Image (cartoon, helix red, strand yellow):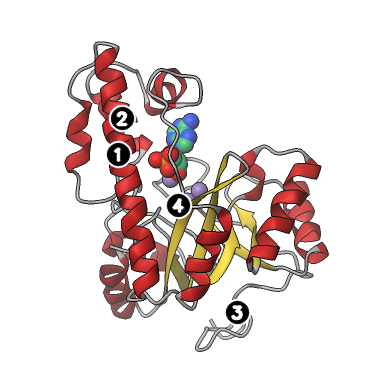
C-alpha cells in the first residue's frame, strides 16, 4: 500500500543523511505525493527541496521541527506550511542555532576535560549542530563503536558530555509557528516515554498554546499505539498527522513514506489545506 503523505523528514541541514534533492527524489520514488521537510530548528534545505519537488511533480510543504522545553523535558513540535521569510520565525531559528552552537562548544569542552580532544570541529558544519554530529565524531575517532553507544556512554542525561540546552518554551515555539502561518503538530508523542497522565498534561498544554495536531502515525508504532494516539487526538479535538521522521534508510524506516495509514476516524491535518492532492486522485 502506498502512502501519499509524509509530513516529517530530515536532511543534512539537520541530522539526516540525504541532501534535500535526494530526499525529495526518494520520497517521490516511494510514492509520496505531499512531503514536508522538517529539519530540526532550520529551514535552510527548503528552497532546494521545493525546487526538486517541482521537478518530481510532488508537493513540498515547508516545515521545521522545533526543539522546545516543557516542564524540564525536551519536546519536538513540527511546524507545517510555514512562511520561511517570516521575520519572527527567522529570529527564533537564529536564536536556537546559537543555542545549539553554544551547547556544541560545551559538549566539546566536556569531552576535552575527559581527555577526548578535538570535538569542536563539529561546530564548523554548515547545518545545525546536533548531538548526532558529536556522536559521529566519537565513532570516527574510535571513542565509541557506533552512534547508539556514543549516545549511551556520553550524550544522554547523566553522562559526561550531556549538556542541557535552553530551548524556547512550548508556548513560544507554537507561537512562532502560528505567527509564520503554520500548523503546529506535536511530534512522536510516544517517544517522550511519559505516563498516560503526563502525556495528557502535555497534550493539554500543547492545545492551550495553539497546537492543532498530534503525530498519530510515525515510524515504529504498533496498531495499538496508533489507536491510542488517535483517541487522544479526538479527546482534545486535534487533527492527526503522518510522518516517517526519516533520517536515513534503516531496516525499520526503509524509506520516507513507509508507514501505515491514518485510522479512518482521524481528521487529517491537511484537511482544508489549499492545493493538496487528494488521496483518491493521487
Ligand atoms: P539534539 O536535538 O541535538 O539533542 O539531538 C537529538 C537527535 O539525536 C534526535 O532527533 C535523534 O535523531 C537523535 N537521537 C536521539 N537519541 C539517540 C540515540 N540514543 N541514538 C541515536 N540517535 C539518537
Ligand atoms: Mn533527529
Ligand atoms: Mn523529533
Ligand atoms: Mn524528526
Sooner in the amino-acid sequence: mark 3 or mark 4: 4
According to the image, label 1 marks what residue?
Answer: 102
Q: Is residue 84 visible?
A: yes
Mark identifier at residue 112: none
Q: Position of residue 230 (x, y in %)?
A: 76, 60
Q: Quadrant of residue 133?
A: top left
Residue at (22%, 36%) from the top-left corner? 122
Indicate left or right for 180 with 200 as reference. left
Q: Position of residue 43 (x, y in %)?
A: 34, 64
**Label 3 crowding class (10 Å Cα cut-off): few <14, some 14-19, many 20+?**
few
Q: Are marks 1 and 2 in contact (CB under 8 Å)?
A: yes
Q: Position of residue 154 (x, y in %)?
A: 40, 20
Sooner in the amino-acid sequence: mark 4 or mark 2: 2
Indicate left or right for 221 with 47 as reference. right
Q: CA distance from mark 3 to mark 4?
A: 21 Å
According to the image, label 3 marks what residue?
Answer: 279
Whether label 2 lies within 8 Å of ligand 1 gets the answer no
Amino acid at each position: 500500500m502506498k502512502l501519499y503523505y509524509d509530513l516529517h523528514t530530515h536532511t543534512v541541514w539537520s541530522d539526516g543523511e540525504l541532501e534535500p534533492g535526494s530526499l525529495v527524489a526518494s520520497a517521490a520514488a516511494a510514492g509520496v505525493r505531499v512531503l514536508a521537510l522538517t529539519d530540526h530548528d532550520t529551514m535552510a534545505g527548503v528552497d532546494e527541496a521545493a525546487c526538486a519537488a517541482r521537478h518530481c511533480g510532488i508537493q513540498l510543504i515547508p516545515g521545521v521541527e522545533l526543539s522546545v522545553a516543557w516542564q524540564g523535558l525536551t519536546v519536538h513540535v513540527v511546524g507545517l506550511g510555514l512562511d520561511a521569510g517570516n521575520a519572527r520565525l527567522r529570529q527564533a531559528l537564529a536564536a536556537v542555532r546559537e543555542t545549539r552552537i553554544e551547547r556544541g562548544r560545551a559538549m566539546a569542552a566536556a569531552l576535552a576535560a575527559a581527555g577526548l580532544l578535538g570535538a569542536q570541529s563539529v561546530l564548523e558544519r554548515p547545518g545545525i549542530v546536533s548531538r548526532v554530529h558529536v556522536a559521529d565524531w566519537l565513532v570516527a575517532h574510535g571513542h565509541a563503536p557506533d552512534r547508539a553507544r556514543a549516545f549511551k556512554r556520553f550524550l544522554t542525561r547523566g553522562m559526561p558530555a550531556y549538556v542541557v540546552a535552553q530551548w524556547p518554551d512550548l508556548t513560544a515555539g507554537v507561537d512562532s509557528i502560528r505567527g509564520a502561518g503554520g500548523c503546529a503538530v506535536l511530534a512522536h508523542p510516544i517517544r517522550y516515554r511519559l505516563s498516560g497522565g503526563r502525556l495528557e498534561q502535555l497534550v493539554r498544554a500543547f492545545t492551550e498554546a495553539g497546537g492543532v495536531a498530534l503525530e498519530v502515525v510515525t515510524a515504529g508504532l504498533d496498531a495499538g499505539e496508533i489507536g491510542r494516539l488517535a483517541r487522544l487526538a479526538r479527546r482534545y479535538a486535534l487533527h492527526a498527522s503522518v510522518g516517517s521522521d526519516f533520517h536515513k534508510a534503516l531496516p525499520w524506516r526503509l524509506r520516507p513514506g513507509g508507514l501505515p495509514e491514518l485510522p479512518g476516524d482521524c481528521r487529517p491535518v491537511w484537511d482544508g489545506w489549499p492545493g493538496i492532492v487528494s488521496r483518491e486522485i493521487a
